[in-house]
Amino acid sequence: MGKIVLVTGAARQLGGRFVRRIQRDPGVDRVIALDAVTPGHQLGDAEFVLADIRQSAIARILAEHSVDTVVHLDVSAKASGAGGRTTVKETNVIGTMQLLGACQKSPAVQRLVVKSSTNVYGSAPRDPAVFTETTPPKSLPSGGFAKDAVEVEGYVRGFARRRPDVAVCVLRFANILGPEPDSPLADYLTLPVLPTVLGYDPRLQFVHEDDVVDVLEIAAREPRRGTLNSGTFNIAGDGVLLLSQCSRRLGRPTVPVLLPAVTWVGTALRTIGMTDFSPEQIRLLTHGRVVSTVQMRETLGFRPRFTTAETFAEFARSRGPGLLPPERVGRAVGRLAEIPLGGGQAGTTHSTHGAR
């Protein structure tokens, strides 16, 4: 008999895509798709189970279906269906605790894959230029999804110590973009005008939705020869983009705001429901974040099909034209860069941490 795979978060767009993909694996016998809300997309031949991972019933579901592989995708910065930040946090943290407790009791579980985020590194002024999987954050995230991800990974490490017989893979994804993204950063980049932090131009990394599904499939299988898919891996496309480059490629003008006022702007945007401009996102848009993907390539054996720039281009095409044509924005920025500021030489720039 082939593998029996349980996928949490199946009602999300990414979860649905993975459920449909993993069914095509000849080594998979059955797929159990689980979520607390009914999905609005097709799940192929997967068996859908309507259940909340925050409830103890998850242990019964694992036992009834003799699940041997668990792919936990229900860790997100946004709620699926009704519910706000409280519901998201409970699902991320309490739900993960319940799921891991059920996995610990199940002798059939042999492999666990957990979707995490590079948000666990935080974003701070004195961050290293590049984070590796073993780099400790200079400042631990104090709230929001980033803190959820840190807590989730802590519980996963505890589970791995208690069940050393289970192969555990944690995938720390950079900002996920593509034609159908579902994240606060994607919502921010869709705004007609992008508020930015005055004096900062952060470096950003992206990973394409297609690459996310590909690497999840690699993590859920037995490791290929010469590779190891147990451990923690940063997942991102090659290269980086500055926020200013992103805005020009989208054709969306920016409005630089003094750092103390950015929080007020974020609160206003959340109040009117335009985007979840959280403190952790403000820190990202101030200091940026770049991670090393050496282990992803050399140990996991995964090479993304899309670079950061190509991923962003796919996203930009799906959003449609901005207020200004990208080429006009680029020319305007170029002319502004030639204007001397404060008596300095034309073209002089002031470096910031975010633009290393």
Image: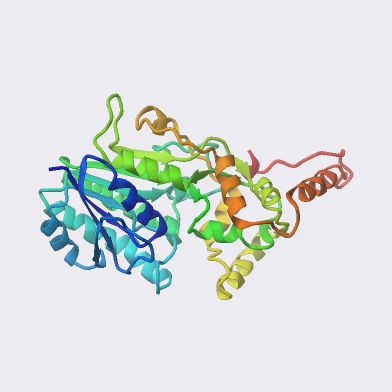
The quadrant of the rendering that contains the C terminus is top right
The quarter of the picture where residue 321 lies is bottom right
The reply to whether residue 219 is in sight is yes
What residue is shown at x 68% (from left), y 48% (from top)? 249
**Residue 9 percent location from the top left of the image:** 33, 59
- Determine whether 94 is above or below 201 in the image: below
Q: Residue at x 50, y 55 (%)?
A: 181
Left-right relation of 267 to 109: right
Q: Name the residue located 30 percent from the left edge and 50 percent from the top edge.
A: 154
The image shows residue 75 at horizontal and vertical percentages of: 36, 57
Q: Please state, as top left, top right, bottom left or bottom right, where the N terminus lies in the image.
A: top left
The quadrant where residue 354 appears:
top right
Q: Where residue 244 appears, x then y in whole percent?
A: 68, 48
Query: Does residue 351 sit above or below 15 in this rendering?
Result: above
- In the rendered view, tell whether residue 68 sits above or below residue 183: above
Q: Is residue 143 visible?
A: no
Q: Closer to the camera, 222 or 196?
A: 222
